[in-house]
Amino acid sequence: MSNVVFILGAGASKQCGAPLMGDFLDIANNLFRSKLVEDKRVQFERVFAAIGELQAVHSKAQLDLNNIESIFTVLELGRIIQKIPGIPTSEIPETIASLKELIVKTLEVTIKFPTNQTYIGPPKPYEAFTSLLTHLQKEAFPHQTAAVISFNYDIAADIAMCRAGQGPNYIIENAPGNHLGIPLLKLHGSLNWATESVSRKIRPLHLFNYLQRYIPNGYSEHASIEVPIGSHLADYFKQIESMQVDQEPVIVPPSWNKADYHAALSDVWAAAAQHLSEAEYIYVIGYSLPETDSFFRHLYALGSVGTTPLRKFAVFNPDSIGDVDKRFRSLLGPGAIARYEYHEQTFEQAIAHIRNQFPKRKT
């Protein structure tokens, strides 16, 4: 297991263009109105029509229609109870699939990856992050082992770890030629994870394989490009591996109800809990612990039980109001509170701060 555990949220990817959950629908709507997502027009229209129908809920209840996490949760619950205002029951699964495709397309369009000829590299903050991981493993004294837990669907961390020779190790399947990769535990799924149509097994499209084959149009004309791996999943597995997979990637709602995904993702969640239980240092970067995410609260409560003494639990978030700090303080028990720190810092600032805490051996 790992001495150091990083927990990454949407705020970590914000510096490379990814929208925060609270801004996601506004950005998706802007892309739609600007005709930048025409190949997914039908899916975007279906999602925004469903949100329009949900306006009827406001006459009797409060519902945050501006937050994609809230919409995702409502649609999933509506599928279970077979009731969503204005949407026929038979169309609920299609609406959920459309929401997933909206998420995929929005992330693919907004996150840009730097290029050098045909080489596609990681966004800047993540390149520094993988440098930190290398420092911990090879330069810090004493050497540290690390694991990364992520709530993000995007592949910014994945590409950075791939380019740095760090795997990643998704637990569900090892990266080609790198059986000792650093664990990257994506609790809510990923743009590059597909579901086999028959077995329902999750199959990652490993970045090492994908980047060898993907040559974007006009790559030499731009300093950064989109990497539409989520949109390529079904065609890739059909053409390269002769396998039928679902059209949309594995995108798990960030809510309490993950029962339908339990069989496929239980190994990922179990590994995350195990790493938390044995971590000496836990660094939370860009994750705000929203009130709706009871899943992580319970995962942390169960996973943090262990014999390894916790030396530090540090949260890095640019929130200056104090809400994020308060939510984490309410999460932690007395032992962890004694080791708790809150830093009003961005992802990039956090990387430098953490690196300074693990100096090299003095010569």
Image (cartoon, rainbow, N blue to C red):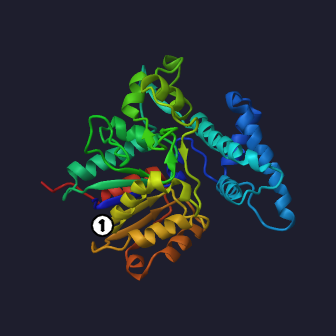
The structure residue drawn at horizontal position 74% and vertical position 44%, both measured from the top left corner, is 47
Which quadrant of the structure image shows residue 94? top right
Q: Amino acid type of disc 1?
A: Glu
The structure residue drawn at horizontal position 57% and vertical position 41%, both measured from the top left corner, is 17
Position of residue 81 measured from the top left corner of the image (x, y, whole percent): 71, 60
The residue closer to the viewer here, 283 or 74, is 74
Position of residue 259 measured from the top left corner of the image (x, y, whole percent): 54, 59
Quadrant where the image shows the C terminus = bottom left
Position of residue 219 measured from the top left corner of the image (x, y, whole percent): 50, 20
Give left or right: position of 80 versus 87.
Answer: left
The structure residue drawn at horizontal position 49% and vertical position 33%, both measured from the top left corner, is 113
Quadrant where the image shows the N terminus = bottom left
Give left or right: position of 280 versus 236.
Answer: left
Vertical side of 316 occupied by 326: above or below = below
- Helix or strand or loop: what does disc 1 sit on? helix
Residue 227 is at least partly visible in this image = no
Q: Which residue is mark 1?
A: 278
Position of residue 254 measured from the top left corner of the image (x, y, whole percent): 58, 57
Which quadrant of the structure image shows residue 360? bottom left
Vertical side of 57 occupied by 237: above or below = above
